[in-house]
Image (cartoon, rainbow, N blue to C red):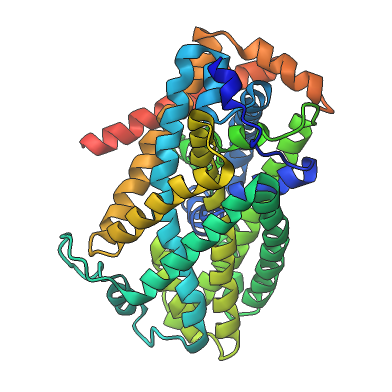
Amino acid sequence: SPAAKATSADRGAFSGRTAFIFAAIGSAVGLGNIWRFPAVAYENGGGAFILPYLVALLTAGIPLLFLDYAIGHRWRGSAPTAWRRFKRWTEFIGWWQVLIALIIALYYALILAWATNYTIFSLDQRWGDDPAGFFGEYTQALGGAEATISFDIVPAVLVSMIIVWLAVIIVMALGVQKGIAASSVVFIPLLVLMFVILVARALFLPGAIDGLEALFKPNWGALLDPSVWIAAYGQIFFSLSVAFGIMLTYSSYLKKKTDLTGSGLVVGFANSSFEILAGIGVFSALGFMAQAQGVAIDEVVTDGVGLAFIAFPAIISQAPTGAGTLIGVLFFGSLVLAGFTSLISIVEVVIAAIQDKFGFARIAATLWVCVPLAVVSTALFSTTMGLPLLDVLDKWANEYGIVAAALVSTIVVTYVVRGLPTLRDHLNHQGTFGIGTWWLVCVGVIAPLVLGTSLVLSTRDLLM
Ligand code: PHE
């Protein structure tokens, strides 16, 4: 049968729960924790945001994490294979996830390449007193350049793209345990260590306390605004990497008997803790920046590319010598580590699918997936189209692609196939604690409602 062929002897396995938990935390803790959460929290009620955020974690993030685990572990396969075994015609959901993974990998690698360069640029603060202008020249895409394809490759970006993809290829070729788990077991503690030092230093910058006050000052009125709740669910979905096929794939590498629910709680809370730590670090730095420039915090709050590659370089240059370099190396180094362990998780979705589909050995599958990805991402983004394209892909993947995948999978599992009770039994045979009816309500009612609403809202924004 095709299913027998798909389970090639070459299928990887985690050595145990710890390896799995580190790999899963590695995937969850990514760029989103560092450069997305702080601004989202600030703009959606500050200290009061913690309430919708925790509700979203408990009513959708962790329940959907369990769903991913249950499908992957019960049906043991890459995303398309596990979905096919669940119910033949649902295989398309898995391929949809593979497509999203491919797109995210393309631009995630680029950001990692930038962060790698900027870790080194921090040493001599190469951006001088014009970080925005420097970044524009560096990417050749900012500063109003026309979005035309001109292959004027920037050597620095090119070199670090090659380094990033070589590292990915080596780790992925080493396989699930020796590659993915082993690198996460080293990188995640290192990331936490570096980030704690970063936060500790940033807290002592003048103005840091003002930044924290701005972040944590609760605006309780915000809780009456539905968009604040949607933002909380959006952040949780993205941050936990649920519905991407990642957690599904990872859990298929676990032993038959494993505590799935216990592991899910560890991953969920570890991810959120890191997110709050990042909020403290980023807002200490922003508070310092506002004070140094004599402006209100509100004027310096940004997220994403602007926060990392324009605001932080400015902060690094304005900080006392020594402190600036330290903050720069730790900040960009953290982006590299957090981003790398997320990038390999998204690439694994594709590699596992190709392995299952064609029966390839690990190394062959790695090369078939990573070499074209490396070439395409380097070629695409080495042009002046890079930055605009990154925005488009990111928006498409995260506001539509993944929300639609999550919505379709919760509806299909709950109402079309009616598979939730079986999956719950599977989880309950494994975990240290049992899950009850509330899980069915979260996955079958709350999650689809929130996902449907946010899909409608983003589509409305698109049309208006
Ligand atoms: N969870 C990651 C983050 O918070 C985002 C991500 C999702 C990365 C899926 C890769 C794949 O940054």
Picture coordinates of residue 169, whole percent (x, y)? 52, 56
User: Relative to residue 258, is residue 437 drawn left or right?
Assistant: left
From the viewer's side, name the closer residue of 2 and 428.
2
Please indicate, yes or no, whether residue 321 appears anywhere in the rendered image: yes
Q: Nearer the viewer, residue 188 or 177?
A: 177
Could you say which is closer to the camera, residue 209 or residue 405?
Answer: 405
Residue visible at 38% across and 39% down in the picture:
399
User: Measuring 54% from the left and 64% from the top, which residue is drawn there?
Assistant: 335
What residue appears at the point 58 percent right and 58 percent down from the top-left corner? 338
Residue 376 point in image, percent of width and height: 33, 53
The extreme bottom residue here reads 321
The answer to whether residue 46 is seen in the rendering is no
The quadrant holding residue 274 is bottom right
Name above or below for residue 82 compared with residue 19.
above
Question: Which x, y percent locates residue 317?
Answer: 47, 85
Q: Tell me the quarter of the picture where residue 155 sits.
A: bottom left
Q: Is residue 169 above or below residue 336?
A: above
